[in-house]
Image (tube, grey):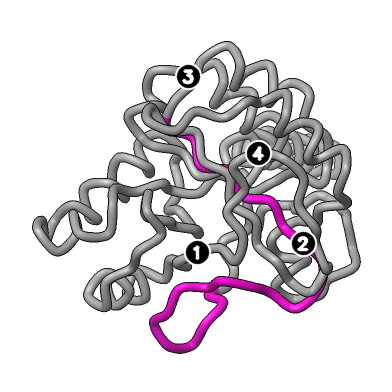
Amino acid sequence: MWRKILFICIICSVTIFFIFHSFTKRQHYIPVFNVLTTPAAITSGMKGSALTVNIAFGDDDVQQWIEQLQSPYPLIFLDLEWAERYPSTIEMMIEKNITIGLLGKDGNAYMESNDLLEKQIDQYEALFQSKPLWFRTADEQFPKELLNALSKKEINALSSSIRWTGGKIKLEQNGEIVSVSSYKNHQIDFKALQQLTNDHPFNTIDQVLFNLQSKKKKIPN
């Protein structure tokens, strides 16, 4: 009798392990908070500096940059059409547990199309099997109606305090959020971006927003 009970317990434990292992492969952040209590775009944090990268253009150079990235990772916003064209790069980001945000269109596009945001969230969920926690428009303009819609969806709107386009920058470590964009009409040198990360001790976005000191990897709930 006891042998049967022990055998059943072992089978259940093994099953739970594989389910959890499979789940963690598909999650890349903890969806546990909304940063602001009222609809607004976040532009800075409390302490340190965070790097955020918008990707809507690039191929091998993006993949090589992702391969070289080391923790603490930047928050990367992805254009969904771009993401669908480069599944191997996306898989690499998920394997490295890099937080991926939704990079939208210009802010005015959401005034012209009431269902654009909903379609993009559905598209994101189809790609990543989870709802985005972070959202940024391509031009970092956030109409009030868009902010209200994001708040209802419990998605954080993130802008930036510094837009890097190349060269050296001085960071005061006072909660700066640095944004870098790789667009078709504004391409960046990923080698220069790698040098930027080598020159500055960037923190993760949650460390900068909440002054967290831990650098342990996030574990999905």
- Label 2, secondary structure: give it: strand
Can you give x and y, in whole percent of width and height, for residue 108 in the image?
A: 20, 59
The reply to whether discs 3 and 2 touch (Cβ–Cβ < 8 Å) is no
State which region is magenta.
Answer: 34-56
Tag 2: amino acid: Ser
Tag 1: amino acid: Ser
Q: Earlier in the sequence, mark 1 or mark 3?
A: 3
Residue 169 highlighted magenta (yes or no): no
Q: Is residue 165 above or below residue 121?
A: above
- Label 4, secondary structure: give it: loop
Bin the neighbour count of mark 3 within 10 Å (Cα to Cα): few under 14, some 14-19, many 20 and up: few
How far, Cα to Cα, is label 4 from label 2?
17 Å
Q: Nearer the viewer, residue 106 or 152?
A: 106
Q: For the view shown, which residue lies furthest in the top direction?
A: 60
Q: Nearer the viewer, mark 4 or mark 2?
A: 4
Q: Nearer the viewer, residue 61 or 123?
A: 61
Give the residue at x 51% y 42%.
54
Q: On the picture, is 67 further left or further right than 159?
A: right
Q: On the picture, is 183 further left or further right than 5?
A: left
Q: Earlier in the sequence, mark 3 or mark 4?
A: 3
**Disc 2 marks which residue?**
49
**Disc 1 marks which residue?**
159
Quarter that holds the C terminus: bottom right
**Disc 4 marks which residue?**
166
Bin the neighbour count of mark 1 within 10 Å (Cα to Cα): few under 14, some 14-19, many 20 and up: many
Q: Nearer the viewer, mark 4 or mark 1?
A: 4
Can you give x and y, in whole percent of width and height, for residue 161 in the image?
A: 60, 66
